[in-house]
Image: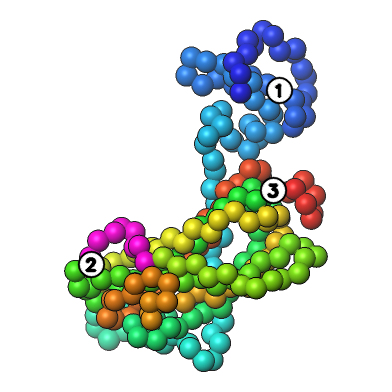
Amino acid sequence: MAEIKGSDLPAATSIIGTDIVIGVESSASKSITAEKILMTQSLTAADVRWKSNRVSPLSSKVGGSRDPDFAKFSDDGSGSQGVFLYHFDDTTEEELYVDVQANPDYKEDTAFYIQIWWIPKSNGGVGEKVSWGVEFNIAEPGGVFGNTTLFYSNIPLPNGDLIANRLYYTEIAIPAFTVSVGASSAARIFRDATGAGEIDDYTDDAMLISVEVKYEVDALGASTRTVK
């Protein structure tokens, strides 16, 4: 936004969301709407704000055909019952089914990112990779679901040779669709063990601990119960 003198703005005892008020960044004054202040949005237009929608693997659905094993991940070292996670095989494509929806604070029609958080069961060889995949379709409220689309990635973060019991995430970028608040998706999360999408040459189980959908926000919420 253009710089503006504070003295050029009329005094007001109350404001609405679209009224212009003064904001200060470093030594410059800039005009900014009241609603952007309420959103705690930066004065710099290039800045964005992000939120996440977590999907727990433990609340997802197995399909009965290519289910990952639900097995012990860790215990207290003295024979406790321990904690369990889904273990995805290194030779067979295994999967879980989830559903997600565009939240009221989602910036409509923007890209989003699926982060798959996982743990290698053992150390990997030099340069070995785990490939994760997402298959989904999406529809607007009142819309018709079409065919699914598949996306893959095998780049772990932090990148490098895999270390046993270290927490990694693999991010899958989903390009911008025409997506509004309330749009819903049926999805499948799977280990691409056969390398259909990307190379997967890690020769042990990958243990899934969490799935997050990272998305850009432009409001505290929707302006009505059904639309922005």
The secondary element bearing badge 2 is classed as: loop
| First reached walking from the N terminus: tag 1 or tag 2 | 1
Magenta residues span 154-161
Q: Amino acid at mark 3?
A: Gly
Task: Where is residue 198? Give x, y as percent.
Answer: 38, 70
Quarter of the rendering occupied by the N terminus: top right
Q: In the depicted view, which residue is nearer to us: 111 or 199?
A: 199
Q: CA distance from mark 2 to mark 3?
A: 43 Å
Q: In the depicted view, which residue is nearer to us: 64 or 79?
A: 64
Q: CA distance from mark 1 to mark 3?
A: 21 Å
| First reached walking from the N terminus: tag 1 or tag 3 | 1
Q: CA distance from mark 1 to mark 2?
A: 54 Å
Report the mark closest to the observer, 1 or 2: 2
- Count neighbours of disc 3 (C-alpha within 10 A) and say few if under 14, some if 14 to 19, many if 20 or more: some
Per the picture, the main secondary structure of the magenta-coloured stretch is loop
Task: Where is residue 27? Give x, y as percent.
Answer: 48, 14
Task: Where is residue 110? Give x, y as percent.
Answer: 60, 50
Residue at x 66% of width, y 43% of height? 219
Q: Which mark is residue 4?
A: none
Q: Is residue 211 visible?
A: yes
Q: Is residue 81 visible?
A: no
Circles 1 and 3: CB distance less than 8 Å?
Answer: no
Q: Residue furthest left?
A: 126
Circles 2 and 3: CB distance less than 8 Å?
Answer: no
Q: Is residue 10 above or below residue 127?
A: above
Q: Which residue is mark 2?
A: 127
Q: Which residue is mark 1?
A: 20
The secondary element bearing badge 1 is classed as: strand
Q: Which residue is mark 3?
A: 221
The secondary element bearing badge 3 is classed as: loop
Q: Is residue 119 above or below residue 105?
A: below
Q: Quadrant of residue 85?
A: bottom left
